Image: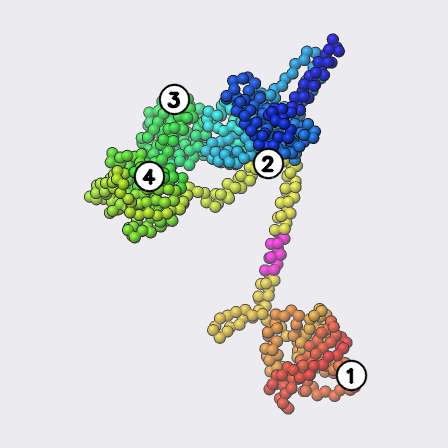
Amino acid sequence: MRRGGVCFVLFILFVCISARIRDPYSILGVHRKADTQEIKKSYKKLAKEWHPDKNPSPDASSKFIEINQAYELLMDPERRRIFDTTGQTEDQPNFRKTYDYSSYGRFDPFDNIFSNFGGNFHFNFKHGDGTNIYMKQSITFKSYQNSIVHLSKKQPYLILFYAVWCVACAHIEPIWKRLNEELEPINFGMATVHAEREVELAKKIGVKTVPYLVMLLDGHPYHYTEPSVSMVSSVDFIRSKFPNRLVQRVTEGNLESFLGGWLDNKVRVLIFGRLDIIRLRYLTVGWEFRERAVIGYVQMDRADTDSIRARYSVSNKVDTLLVFHEDMHTPVASVAMTDLPYPTMRDIIEGNKFLVLPRLSSQSVFDALCPVESVRSRRRLCVVLVTQDDPSHDPSRAALREYAISDQARERDRVRYTYLFREKQVEFMNALTAASGSPLETNHHIVILWRKDQNHLKYEWLEGGWEVEPDKQNASQESLRAAVQRLLHSNEPMPYETVVQELFDEHAQGIVWRIINKLVSVQDYLRDNVTEDDLLPAVSILVTVLFIVAGGYIMSYLVRLEEERVAKSNFTYVDQSGKTTLQPQLRVHELRGETYNGLVRMLKPGCRTLVMLCDSESKSKLMPKFHTACWPYRKNKTLMFAFLNIERASAMEWYKRILVLGLPEPRDLNINPKNTIGTVISLNGHRKYYCLFHAKHPEGAYGVSTWLLAARFTRAAMVV
């Protein structure tokens, strides 16, 4: 008996191992050297034969999945190469550089075998059914980008990331099934993603473990962060991610402001319910129609809502939905049921989602109210009243609104009455007024449009404009009725044609709100994705960036202070035209014992000091000329300027000494100090040489009458 049990175990092991290495070639019925065309042809034939919708066999579903898996393996060159060389089929595409899912302990059939070795054998392969329900809703990265993201603008999506051998994924399968049963009827999209195959999608959303739950609203993923998945926590998570004021609570205090807010070009919807919480189906219907309707919730059996029920004769025994247009006293549509189903609410709102006189406030509204019709005999007209966003234009809009709901407005399926704000739709109005027959003043005028295609439209202006005065109003209405009937029932061409661009979106958020929403999205993403282990490097990077920014600011501040200091040292110059400018100041120092080191000995390489010789009598006359000659070089940082008073005894001794150093052989010099006046010496203290510029002048003029900088250049070694 013991020996027979061991043989049975070995048989089961063989079956399990064999099942894991099924030959994809035999599944598709192709040879090992088959090309992609042969594989595709065989796959299409088998998929059509074993599709669960066309094959009643109970094995059709598993066989269909097996065919798809074999096809995916053979169409992946890398996986096919691995199978041909190693016989391995469990390798998953695109997930070699993957996240670590080891913490979830994937299912292994050997566990149950050895755990039941001593008793009756029973195997609990729950992954089979779980994988099937996940695979039926499985999406790819391509379908996510091309379809799901776009659909999430109207329909919220709940996405579950799973793996094939994930035990936790199998445990939450009943919860996922129940979520499907509860959420799909109220317009929730349900999808699953095979995390090991769709690595790029998992990385894009930020999935690091499985199972992982994500809610998608308007293309933005919101992450479920609870440690375990349950029905209650999942619903709370879903409810918390909808915008706060998606469905507003309405009481006696805010009823008037709620119903009177239709100037935003949206209809008002009141839902009467008995629960103290707003049901999830009301949130989803609010999300779908958030661009065209504002939803309000009235909780019955409350003292501050009794007057609202009495006002509209609403029973407190059933749930009721009322749709309002401009008239807050009478709803245009209503429905009352014990439990309002989502399709009923959607149909009621869809049929009444535009006001009696809606405003052309965006391109989407324009497309819905004035659809394209290329055939002239079936053309659809859009009657547009041109106004401004000014209360003084309210009578014109009210008159057209009354006309639209009166019996005179016939064939409403082919004619829509609208208005626009001229100052907001500038480009659209420029296109309509380009024709020569357009009125000079378009306010309170009506233009009748026919859209031939997306950008081309034909139109004509109503003669006489739209009058609201009692003695002229009837004439305007009759003129409008005649023009509409003529255009609907005759093939008469319209006089003007133009090309229009997209309308300006008056409901678009401003730059400030977009920045705020972006910051909120970043905050949500960081809260959902940044762990404590990631926090320290992030803080370190942030501190480093702040330090660099602060250092740059301090450096720029110091530079600005230096510039201000230099600016203060400049002097004001007034030119001949009277224009005042700041000019850099030219500083001329006196060469003496205290300044000798700074002007001569401590000069940096490449720097020189120009020294002019003068006495007390000639200084006042020579200094302006020296200043003028040196002025063009005031910005040269390698030059310094000085003067030497030869009346000082030490000055003449120093001058004689440098002259002797320039002679071929030493000798005594007898120099008349008066003859040195006006001489300029260029000193290079670093290289220890000088150049001498001696001014020639007439006898007795002390060099004042002429200033000739060029006479004799002397270069010699200089001891400093």
Image: 669 above or below 531? below
Are the residues tagged 2 and 3 within 8 Å (C-beta)?
no
Which numbered mark, 2 or 1, is in the foreground of this view?
A: 2
Q: How crowded is mark 2: few (under 14 residues within 10 Å), some or many (20 or more)?
A: some
Name the residue type under label 4. Val
Which numbered mark, 2 or 4, is in the foreground of this view?
A: 4
Disc with the residue nearer the chain's start (1 vs 3): 3
- Please name the residue shown 67% across and 30% down the image: 84
Give the residues drawn in magenta, as a range. Answer: 550-560
What is the quadrant of the C terminus in the image?
bottom right
Q: Is residue 155 left or right of residue 380?
A: right
Q: Compute the Cα span from label 4 to label 3.
A: 43 Å
Could you tell me residue 164's position as x and y percent? 62, 26
Name the residue type under label 2. Glu
Disc with the residue nearer the chain's start (2 vs 1): 2
- The residue to which callout 3 is attached is 337
Name the residue type under label 1. Pro
- The residue to which callout 4 is attached is 375
Q: Compute the Cα span from label 1 to label 4.
A: 110 Å
* Viewer-nearest residue: 385 or 143: 143
